[in-house]
Image: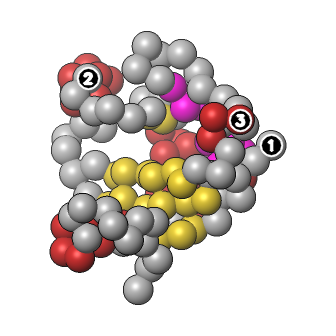
Amino acid sequence: MAGVAKLFDDHILDKSKESVDLNDEEYKGKVIGLYFSAHCSDNDEESFNEYYEHMPWLTLDFKESDKKAEIEKKFHITGIPTLILLDGYSGDIICTDADERISLDDSEGEKFPWKSL
């Protein structure tokens, strides 16, 4: 099992709430972004679903609050919003401050994937 897939233990869902296999060839060699939102989306599942409805990406199952806390601890998430980038196969960290790289340095993504400063 690839590093990122193992990290999430098959709790990643697509927009139709179907489980996504991060070991699939589709994700091989990809950069995976983890976005920790500043929205009040984690108060209850209904709020989460309303917020997620407008987002284009995959999500961690809302019911997996323990997994969310584990991931936040693993990556030392202390503030939100935060966007980190991982190697899609190994799960190694590429960038811990991607949200800043986008907003301050490279809004067009010309230097993507950014490396942490």
Which element carries disc 2, helix, strand or loop? loop
User: Looking at this rendering, what residue extends furthest in the bottom direction?
Assistant: 117
Q: x%, y% of residue 6?
A: 72, 45
Circles 3 and 2: CB distance less than 8 Å?
A: no
Which element carries disc 1, helix, strand or loop? loop
**Residue at screen point 70% across, 32% down:** 24
**Residue at screen point 51% across, 65% down:** 75
Looking at the rendered structure, the kind of residue marked 1 is Met
Q: Which mark is residue 51?
A: none
Answer yes or no: is residue 40 visible. yes
C-alpha separation, residue under disc 2 versus residue under disc 1: 29 Å
Considering only order in the chain, which callout, 2 or 3, is on the residue closer to the N terminus?
3
Occupied quadrant, residue 84: bottom left
**Residue at screen point 47% across, 16% down:** 17
Occupied quadrant, residue 100: bottom left
Considering only order in the chain, which callout, 1 or 2, is on the residue closer to the N terminus?
1
Q: x%, y% of residue 9?
A: 68, 37
Label 1 neighbourhood size at 10 Å, few (<14), some (14-19), many (20+)? Answer: few
Looking at the rendered structure, the kind of residue marked 2 is Glu
Residue bearing mark 2: 53
Instruction: Look at the image and say whether residue 7 sits in the magenta stretch.
Output: yes
Q: Which quadrant of the rendered structure holds the C terminus?
A: bottom left
Residue bearing mark 1: 1
Residue bearing mark 3: 25
Residue span colored magenta: 4-13
Q: Is residue 97 above or below residue 14?
A: below
Considering only order in the chain, which callout, 1 or 3, is on the residue closer to the N terminus?
1
Q: Which quadrant of the rendered structure holds the N terminus?
A: top right
Instruction: Look at the image and say whether residue 36 sits in the magenta stretch.
Output: no
Colour basis: secondary structure
